[in-house]
Amino acid sequence: MNETRANAITAASPGGAPRILVVEDESALSLLLGYNLEAEGYVVERVERGDEAELRLEEAAPDLVILDWMLPGVSGLEICRRLRAREATRTLPVIMLTARGEEGERVRGLSVGADDYVVKPFSVPELMARVRALLRRARPERVATKLAAGDIELDRETRRVRRAGRDIHLGPTEFRLLEYLMEKPGRVFARSQLLDSVWGFSAEIDERTVDVHIGRLRKALAQRGEEDPIRTVRGAGYAFDETFGRG
């Protein structure tokens, strides 16, 4: 049994979390996608061959498929065509990944039934946003549009943050940082993890940039001297305090 099969999840996902199948033959990219999707709370299965993906899809359909165009065994294009031909998977959300950026190729990918099309190299945060948007359209009950802790509320759809009823004005990076931390209260994220997930794996910036933006986020959230919801773990990173608002 290979590693991807050993890590396969075929049962219903715990807590009703959406299940995502990643079909990508570049091991490093597959691992990166799996890591970031799991950090968002999804249950992830990864396979590297098109024919293996076909078997997994016949056994148990996930909530969404991230599908590479060029695969060993069966191409991603052919898999998408077959998914749309079967009644059980006709509306299954599919995001296609490819190095092909020409307009004609994008049209071809969409014409076989892909819901979205992402050209490599891409921004991981952008892909995560596309995943959320597709899941929200396909199964709105499976994706929370609002996050709340104590007196802080974050609305993903309106991109607004409120604390104690007043608007908190955040830049796009601070918003993504807060969103990412609030999704996993108590979990400590290293600066390198935050760089990969919030800025994207291809970003060429220093880890100290994370400290700068965390500082800005803290200042915005605690303008009136309120409790700081972000916890610094020395030598490890940052976390959204899981006890925030409980006292």
Image (cartoon, rainbow, N blue to C red):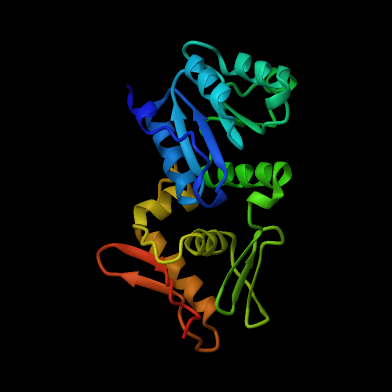
- When asked about the image quadrant of residue 60, the answer is top right
Q: How many marks?
A: 0
Residue 36 in sight: yes
The one of 122 and 135 positioned closer to us in this rendering: 135
- Above or below: residue 176 compared with residue 53: below
The answer to whether residue 98 is visible is: no
Q: Is residue 242 above or below residue 48?
A: below
Residue depicted at x 41% and y 39%:
32
Residue 205's x, y, as percent? 40, 51
Report the residue at 63% width, 57% height from top: 144
Task: Check the image and name the residue furthest to the left.
Answer: 235
In this view, the residue farthest toward the front is 11
In the displayed structure, does residue 145 sit left or right of residue 55?
Answer: right
Q: Residue 155 sits in which quadrant?
A: bottom right
* Residue at the spot 46% in from the left edge and 76% down from the top edge: 229
Please provide percent x and percent y for residue 86. Answer: 70, 19
Give x and y (percent) for residue 187: 39, 62
Estimate the x, y position of residue 89 in percent, counting from the top left: 68, 26
Considering every residue shown, the one lying at the far bottom of the view is: 225
Identify the image quadrant of the N terminus. top left
Residue at x-position 72% and y-position 30%: 91
Considering depth in this image, is 107 or 66 the residue closer to the camera? 66
Q: 131 or 60, which is in the foreground?
A: 60
Q: Nearer the viewer, residue 54 or 137?
A: 54
